[in-house]
Image (tube, rainbow, N blue to C red):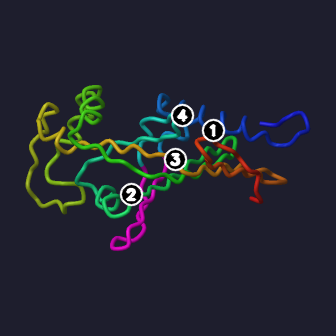
Amino acid sequence: LHDVSGELDPDEVWRDAWARLARATQDRRHAFRHPVVATHAPQLGVRARTVVLRAAEPSPARLTLHTDRRSGKLAALALEPCLSWCFYDRRPRIQLRVETRAVVHVGDAVARDVWERQGPATRAVYAVEPAPATPLGDEVRPPVDPEDATGFAHFAVVECAVEELDWLQLGRSEHRRIRFSASDGVWRGVPIVP
């Protein structure tokens, strides 16, 4: 991640960050596979939770997750469609903080296309009743049929357009940080004080 002068090369850092994100969508053990995302809505406050990174595309810069449409994430995104992501890989000591604007797909062609590629275990997760965060009683819940049509009705794809990416590497003697933002569709990184 250095140019010939030993300084950080923002273009190389950008490419490396997206390569790591792309690998995380395929490698279940990659450190970036399970980021923490946070929502903020005036009536609901700040809420953070761990999700699974489902897709990462550098152009256009976009991150994707899947969730239950009945979840608190979607209630917050309906009020304020901003989602903050935080990834951390302890081996290279790299943190990515990504600010995004979310678009939610429920019951549309995008959701249907993604749904059709899900296996039975994933489909069963979305067919669960009652809704997420509902207190459980003493009743015995029957097994969920992965082909239950309610599964798709509850399935949501959240596509997040990246508005800013903040890259930080923690070093033993010094930390390094670059903030990336786009102007006229062109991403540029500026080294900043960690």
Distance, label 3 to label 2, CA atoms, is 12 Å
Residue for badge 4: 59
Alpha-carbon distance for marks 4 and 3?
A: 10 Å
**Judging from the image, what secondary structure is the residue with disc 2 in?**
loop
Q: CA distance from mark 3 to mark 1?
A: 13 Å
Tell me which numbered mark, 4 or 1, is placed earlier along the sequence. Answer: 1
Q: Earlier in the sequence, mark 3 or mark 2?
A: 2
**Between marks 2 and 4, how big is the CA–CA gap?**
21 Å
Q: Sequence-wise, which precedes: disc 2 or disc 4?
A: 4
Which of the two marks, 4 or 1, is nearer to us in this view?
4
The verdict on residue 43 being magenta is yes
Mark 2 residue crowding within 10 angstroms, few (<14) / some (14–19) / many (20+): some
Q: In percent of the image, x 33 and y 64: which residue is there?
A: 79
Residue assigned mark 3: 162
Per the rendered image, the range of residues in magenta is 35-50
Measured from the top left, where is residue 69 in percent x and y?
Answer: 24, 50
Where does the N terminus fall, quadrant-wise?
top right
Residue 65 on image: x %, y % = 39, 42
Label 2, label 1: how far apart the Cα atoms are? 24 Å
- Sequence-first disc among 2 and 1: 1
Whether 152 is drawn above or below 134: the answer is above
Q: Secondary structure at mark 4?
A: loop
Kindly identify the amino acid type of the residue bearing the numbered disc 2: Pro
Residue 140 on image: x %, y %: 9, 50
